[in-house]
Amino acid sequence: MQKNILVKALSNPLALAGFIIIMVMFLLAMLAPWIAPYDPDAFDVKAILLSPSWQHWMGTDGLGRDVFSRMLFGGRISLLVGLVAVGISTAIGIVLGALAGYYRGWVDTVIMRLVDIMLSIPSFFLILAVIAFLTPSIINIMIVIGLTSWMGVTRLVRAEFLSLSNREFVLASRTLGAKDMRLIFIHLLPNSLTPIIVSAVLGVAGAVLLESGLSFLGLGVQAPQASWGNILTDGKEYIQFAWWLSLYPGMAILLTVLGYNLLGEGLRDALDPRSQSS
Amino acid sequence: MNINTPASIANTPLIDIFKFITTLSILSCFTFASCSQQPEASIDYNKSYPSQDGGTMISAMTGEPSGLIFMVAGESASAAIASNIFNSLLKYNGNLDIEGDLAESWQISDDQKTITFKLKPNLLWADGKPLTSADVLFTWKTVTDENTRSPYASDYQLVSNAEATDALTFKVTYGQVYAPALDSWASLHILPKHLLAGQDIRTTSFARKPVGSNYYQLSQWNHGENLKLTRNPNSVLGQAAIDQLVTRIIPDNSAQFLELMADNIDSMGLDPIKYSRIIPARPELKKNLNLYKELGNSYTYLGFNLKHKPFDDIRVRKAINYAIDKQEIIDGVYLGLGINISSPYKPGTRWSNPTLKPYSYDPEKSRALLKEAGFTKNANGILERDGKPFAFEIITNQNKEREKSAVIIQRRLKEIGIDVKIRAIEWASFISRFINTGDFDVVILGWGLGLDPDQYNIWHSSQQAPGQFNFIGYNNPTVDKLLEQGRSELNPDKRQEIYHTFTEQLLADSPIVYLSAGYGLTAIHKRIEGIVNPIPPAGIGYDSHKWYIPKPYRRNQISAN
């Protein structure tokens, strides 16, 4: 069933474009050690802020490091953070949403109020506050982003569970004496999986942006490790002169976020019977 | 003496977002050219004219002063503005010799403990009231008052008795001989008693609308935007040439630079990349700007927390010193605009010991020293002692030059097997959370120094309490004794000898690694004439009241806002 949806989604040219963008990004990031022409952290004080050339495809930064190599390795961080953070938030969202949607009553009330409270706090500032107390590192960033962005998934899963649990196949199974766990894992969850996937794909785009934002502010990935966000920060000072330091990481973030959004939208359209075209 | 943070005090993350947006909006403004007002067709700014009065000079600063009473505010932004408004008893001339400012003459008693200042006659405040020794006495009482909580109080608390014997005479007596005494009177702004008596100095509105005696007076302060100074008609020291000084507050360095390019400001401080790469590459900028370079009285260093292991071991400190290539940092980070130093004094001054040599870059020696200290390489290529890998964190404030230096050091130390992490922290929490509590292993920081060689606050073992300046925990009885001697020695030659021995001892102990003494870099529009070049030891601005703007070069008065 999942395969059909992917195929259906990819028949939409925009979604296909998104899918290709993401695949290319992943391929470049995974093959970084083989593609990168230079060591991303090796500086050369004689080659500071060189504009793009055949030696340095994307120029060099303020310490003479090769921007192309740093972009490749930075892509690993940005893409990884996006995936893991969304993995964490989706896992939390599924568990809490399933509990709320299946058991209802006070469990539902408690979980939904928690969601309301979390949603009432501006998440970017919450993340800034939390990171200020922790040592900034990739792991911390992934965990903190994950822990502050599960609310959407929770609501989604709960809504799916509420509507599914009154459907005939669930009622039938319950009448036959199925236990809670069997109902949740065999009947309800698999049937709510597709909207979760869509929201996760869209969520990755948000997480990539968040990580770039945090790294831009110096609270994300720490030197000398590269990430698109901190290459962008380095470029800020010299934006009128060394345009390549701002343009390339900016484009990479833009393309990745665009790719995830296009793919997410495509999947949603493929899943939504109302938007089906002939 | 203050901890040195060039252009980075305002570098908190949230402001950064804002800055980024401002930069972008200004940039779009700039590229579309429609919203930036171009001055009339190219004026040749290379002619020189005789001095003439009038005109407006616009400069920019990153941080807004918290107030203009410097003894309370204690920050560089406040000093920059207030020094145009207030006078001290003494001042430095271009060659850093002390001469009278408000004082006409001064006499030191035979026992070296009493100084008698004679004020110039007929001094006036900007509001027309007479300035007398009563004002000086009032200022001394205020700065030493516990309630003022001035960071500079300790210098003046050494005065055991101060009196205004007549309207023009002010006499101070020290408990014991205090060598930096005259310097201290060259940095204390004299405040008007008739406006401040009976007020709480920390909260008075005077800090926002000051009345001084110097060339300029504050005429307007638009918060968050600019401060306007106009000529003080009652200045008895003569009249400045330029009518109006406007200082615009632009928190972001790149936004300032865009304003400079659009000819909306006349001067700004530069970083090495702007100074030696960006401006020279743009003929239209080079045509209108003069660039100035002066060796500042400050340096950047890597400091060890001597209370933490293994930095209590002198072999380890020396090993790290040998493992860092200072020239590489000067070339890579400061683009050659720095000096490799071996003492905490400005190179070329009498206090800097010319016989000392900086630690060379010598990784072999470094490895040998670490081996001697008991470190061996483990399977991962990291040095280890007693089963513990040699790893530490370098912390610094969010300052681009320091962060870059840290990255270079990290790489070099990795080569000899030390695992270094870097953390750049926002200034306020950097000081309160890490420096004041001593919760750090290694820091990269800078010291901005006064002109007197006394560095008791920084190196004496008694100065280690939270908030005091010896936060690295340096403790050497020989150095303590030298610093005490240096403070009470008035003979300059003997003093020089004391401080030369002190710097030698300091270099041998290697409690810090000197990274670079950096240059102050400034761009000033060519319309401003009368700037002394080459810059005298006292710095570019010491006689800025003589700068002038020839009539043909002046901006349209309306656009000069």
Image (spheres, coloured by chain):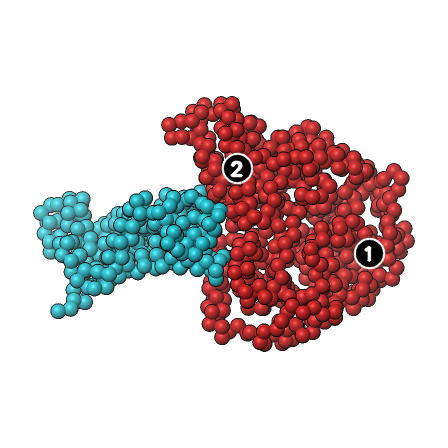
Chain colours: A cyan, B red
Using the rendered image of the protein, determine whether residue B450 is visible from the camera's viewpoint.
yes
- Tag 1 or tag 2, which sits nearer the N-term? 1
Q: Which residue is mark 2?
A: B324
Identity of the residue drawn at 72% across and 46% down: B451
In the displayed structure, does residue A24 sit left or right of residue B552?
A: left
Which mark is drawn over residue B447?
Answer: none
Host chain of mark 1: B
Q: Which residue is mark 1?
A: B102
In the displayed structure, does residue A251 sit left or right of residue B185?
A: left
Amino acid type at mark 2: Ile
Camera-nearest residue between B144 and B47: B47
Camera-nearest residue between A119 and B423: B423
Spatial distance from mark 2 to mark 1, Cα to Cα? 48 Å
In the displayed structure, does residue B84 sit left or right of residue B170?
A: left
Spot occupied by residue B499 in the image (x, y as percentages of width and height): 72, 36
Do callouts 2 and 1 point to residues on the same chain?
yes
